[in-house]
Structures are given as structure tokens and as C-alpha cells.
Image: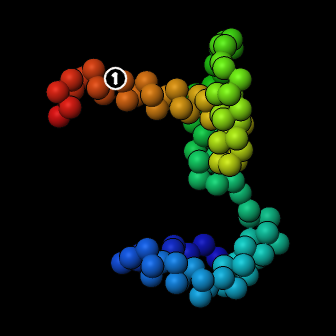
Amino acid sequence: MAKKQPRFETEKKEAEWWAKNQNRIANRFEQAKAAGKLGKGTVARIAGERASQAGPSPTITIRLAEEDLARARTLAAEKGLRYQTYLKMLLHQALDSEENRAAHPSGK
């Protein structure tokens, strides 16, 4: 049932393909649903895999502005994640970025 999405030369050609194949995609979705094979999106799956590999982590308390917390909750929900998981992912990405910047200060 799982087939790879074709590669497209342009965004326009991709949009045309998706529009033309709506019924096909919907049918495959229904087949996966009936077979119990629907899962979470890629971001949620990767976050879950990382969490299971990492083991238990310490609990901390951090103060955030209400607006930042609301934004994090909204963005996390759009990605199918809990906001705590989303914030941990953002922190991890920021730390990686800072380490890379410190290791290569000239930007090379």
C-alpha cells in the first residue's frame, strides 16, 4: 500500500498531480484507516522515537511569557505534538545551532 510520492520538476506540476489524484489518495487513506495503519505525521513520529531512545529526563520548571506559551501550543498542535515535546525539539535545535556557530565562528 505504501508508495513513494513522485518527484516533480516544478511546484505547479506537483499541485496539478495532487489535484488530479485526490480520489486515489483518499482511497489509499481509507484503506490504511481500515487496516489500522494510520499513524502520526513525520514530526510526531520522530519526536516519539527520540523520546523513547533518550529514556527518562529530569523535570524542570521554566517561566515563559503567556504569548510565547500560546504560540508554542498553537504550533505544536499544528504539528500533532504536545507543546512540551515541541519546546524540547526547539531547544534541541537551538542548542545544536549554537554549538555549530561556536565551532565555526567564521560561518564556514
Element marked by disc 1? helix
From the viewer's perspective, is 74 left or right of 35?
left
Judge by depth and name the residue closer to the eye, 43 or 108. Answer: 108
| Quadrant the C terminus occupies | top left
At a point 71% along the width and 36% down the height, the residue shown is 73
Instruction: Indicate left or right for 34 with 14 as reference.
Output: right
Which quadrant of the figure contains the N terminus?
bottom right
- Tell me if residue 52 can be seen: no
Colouring rule applied to residues: rainbow
Q: Which residue is mark 1?
A: 99
Q: Amino acid at mark 1?
A: Glu
Give the class, few, some or many, for how many residues have Cα within 10 Å of label 1's Cα (few <14, many ≥20). few
On screen, residue 45 above or below 107: below
> For this view, does 74 lie left or right of residue 47?
right
Q: Could you tell whether 16 is left or right of 85 in the image?
A: left
Vertical placement of 64 versus 97: above or below? Answer: above
Residue 68: horizontal and vertical position, in percent? Answer: 64, 27
Q: Position of residue 92 (x, y in %)?
A: 49, 28
